[in-house]
Amino acid sequence: MLRQFIEFSIIGIASGGMYVLSALGFVIIFKATRVFNFAMGEMMMVSAFLFLTASKTFGLHWGLALLATLGLSAVLAFLMERFVLRRMIGRPVVVLVMVTLGLGSILRGLAGLIWGHEIFQLPDFLPRAPIFMGDVLIPGKLAWSFLGVAVIAVGFIAYYRYSRAGIAIRATSADLVTAEVLGINVRGVFTMAWVLAGLLAAGAGIAAASVNGVSPQLGFVALNVLAVIMLAGLSSVGGVVIAGIFIGWLETIVGAYLGASWQSFLPYVVVLAVMLIKPNGLFGEARVERI
Amino acid sequence: MSVSSNASARMVPSAPDTNSWITLETVSLVVFAAVAITLPAYASVYVLYMACLVAINVIATVGLNITVGYTGLLSIGHSAFIGVGAYAAGLAMVHLNTPLPVNVLIGGVSAFLVGLVFGIPSLRIKGVYLAIATLAAQYSLYFVFQNWTSVTGGDRGLNLPATNLFYLGDTGFYYGALILAVLACVAARNLFRTRVGRSLIAVRERDYAAEVLGINIVRAKLLAFGIGAAFAGVAGALTASFLRLVNPDQFTLMVSVFFLAAVVVGGRSSIIGSVLGAAFMTLIPDALREILSLTSPGGTANVAGLLSPLREIIFGALIVGFLMFEPRGLMGLVERLRGRKELVGSEASGD
Amino acid sequence: MGVLLAIDDVNLSFGGVHALSGVSLDVEKGRVTSIIGPNGAGKTSLFNVISGFYTPQSGSIRFEKQELSDQAPYQRSPVGISRTFQNIALFSGLTVLENIKLGAHCQLSSGLLSSALWWGKAQREEAALSRRIDEEIIDLLDLREIRDRPIAGLPYGLQKRVELARALVGRPKLLMLDEPVAGMTSSEKQEMAGYIRRCVDEWSTTVLLIDHDMTMVMGLSDHVVVVNFGKVIASGAPAQMQEDPAVIAAYLGEN
Ligand SMILES: Nc1ncnc2c1ncn2[C@@H]1O[C@H](COP(=O)(O)OP(=O)(O)OP(=O)(O)O)[C@@H](O)[C@H]1O
Ligand SMILES: [Mg+2]
């Protein structure tokens, strides 16, 4: 009984890693550009398909396929920013968010046209052998994908904290005008944020698909990430990590004990509850708007 | 910031030829009314079917436009509120055998109330949080539709008795839907001639200035969101009677995106735009099917597989394309064709 | 004359920045009180405290002897406070008339149903308001020509005037103007000062004014309050202030 619970918990925490990655992708774009990127899930989905095509159709080694996917996802994100969102800077946020929703719909449709609507399994590039912690068993794929995700997340956070680009993004997020005055290339920051988000989407997409397979609907699963972000509050990168893992855990536990149909909806109930009690999220801080 | 300076450049104080505008407006209105009223006399079953669908979608689109276009609140769960109206009306029909007018009322009120439940936690917070709450509505309501089997019938849904309005069968339903669509448009139009509607626009454009003028922004947003949901509920009640079937798959996220596209394509903050947008978006999938079956050698079987992804691409492309190149939607195109180069939307203000 | 607005020992800080420290001042009924001070002195912050946008850490704000602190921003218009903003805050998607009408939002009361039906009260109320605006405001501020134009595209000076109209239409007891002539040409400034003068004379509105233009401040004010670094450093009659050593030092220090 207890052992089973622990097992489910570990599985949940491991699958939360995927949420952490895509949530970081959301947050980075939001921090830099104030846009909520509703196409994030579709970017993940497309990345997973790219990985599938590279490794299965073109028979690349999985390491090469991963590199190709990272590159192509970054290019896709770059194109979206350069040719759509860049041209709409200064428009109301609602409009920008609707545009990302439209972009997501286009990507989903394209994926359906190109790859069809079945669920494809990624080739087995991760070791399958389960890992035992004491007498608790963790599926091998999950453990390894979590490890991969953790490496990317730690690398990203370090980059965000300490690199020049990361500092520029944070400065822009704090005060766009001042950042501009200080000589930060704000447009470059916007592009940078999207490219980073593209990379994160690739990691998250492959991680998600390596466990559950990929179909054009994969992006919808990623929408739960929004719940993560709400829970954390948009301003907190550290909060996102905790919230992502929590949501992954909650989803798995709920799925295991109540059934799969409860999975996609319970995170939102938690989020609505948090919104009622702490409007800025559990880790976010309230900002006094300048008038 | 850059946009506000453009605004003056884009404004050409063309002499608004008021007289000819009024005549054109009146003429098109009269032609529209004549066609709409006489339609059942000569239209095929298919055309009448599409006309009913357009009328229903007009109601839902106008509602969403009040929330998204006029008040600037992004709702991506509109179809879930249509679903609430449809189920509420359907249940009333099944269990109480209520007539259409009562169903419509039940649909509107129940969707309004459910809308408030989701609006209250999110509307206190600024920004796009509402979008997430509406996503929550989309998922949780879908979940309820699907899993509360004893009430909703689960995936099979509810089968409903035929509605016989005015003792005219399908024609009667058409007139019912038409009347409601016209009422919805007129009511929305009136709303924006008065303090209530003005306050919604004020909240969208500059919330702090609205507050200084004594507008309770949380209440205004809640009201706008509730009205949008109520219109959706009315449309849902009509859908239920029209299709005589309510099931969860009528109320997916894709349907919500469909209505967002209708608002954007027609023109945000424009009632006539909503009518155009709803009609355009309703006819597109069918036109698409026709074109595909004409051009595709594989026949109908092939078409079905292509249709759904193509629809997603087209909906998405319409949203992106119009927002980028014609933010005022079809209404903007119409005015452009008529040579009225007024403001191309005044979207200078930020969030 | 009584005190309309009494600000008592207000402290406001943002993190480490003390925007207001122990600010106290009284605004006398029927008079023009001006707040002057160098950039960043805390003038706008004080307005935002009065409007309820910023919550001070301590201190009290009483309007007609009623404590305002626990009133939400939207509850302050009905009691008779209105204002304009340093950066024009008009609704650019609406016309001039609609913007002005919004200034009287609190005096209208038609509900959702009556509005949607455009029947009875809603219709009467709107017509009466339009008429009143035409009679009282449009002529007073010379807005006839642009009455039905959209805001976007109007020249800056005119936008400032429309904002004044919107703040006036509700017949506020206290009118707060945040730099009403900033960025104007000198003839526009004179014009604007004339409009403010007219409102004060015709309706004996109490005015709280912020501006950097000394000619206008000295010409309009009955009472001047000088702030610097969030503190009141002097207050008194306009002529007196021009000679006050502390005031001169504050301004010279800035240069
Ligand atoms: N929302 C806010 N968050 C942080 N600091 C703020 C905020 N609003 C004002 N300040 C700070 O408070 C101080 C006073 O600003 P305020 O705008 O009140 O000055 P002001 O006297 O109106 O100046 P100006 O003449 O330039 O308009 C400034 O240091 C400013 O940076
Ligand atoms: Mg100021």
Image (cartoon, rainbow, N blue to C red):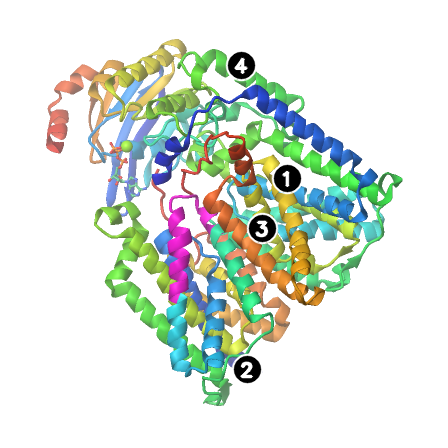
Q: Cβ of disc 1 within 8 Å of ligand 1?
A: no
Marks 4 and 3: which is nearer the front? Answer: 4
Query: Which stretch is magenta?
Result: A74-98
Query: The disc numbered 2 marks a residue on which chain?
Result: A
State whether residue C65 appears in this view.
no
Marks 4 and 2: which is nearer the front? Answer: 4
Mark 4 crowdedness (10 Å alpha carbons): few <14, some 14-19, many ≥20: few
Q: Are marks 4 and 1 on the same chain?
A: no
Q: Is residue B296 above or below residue C3?
A: below
Report whether A58 appears left or right of C179: right
* Residue tagged 3: B118
Q: Earlier in the sequence, mark 1 or mark 3?
A: 3
Query: The disc numbered 4 marks a residue on which chain?
Result: C
State whether residue B146 appears in this view.
yes
Indicate the quadrant where residue A240 lies: bottom left
- Location of residue B325 in the rendering, given as x and y in whole percent from the top left corner: 46, 44
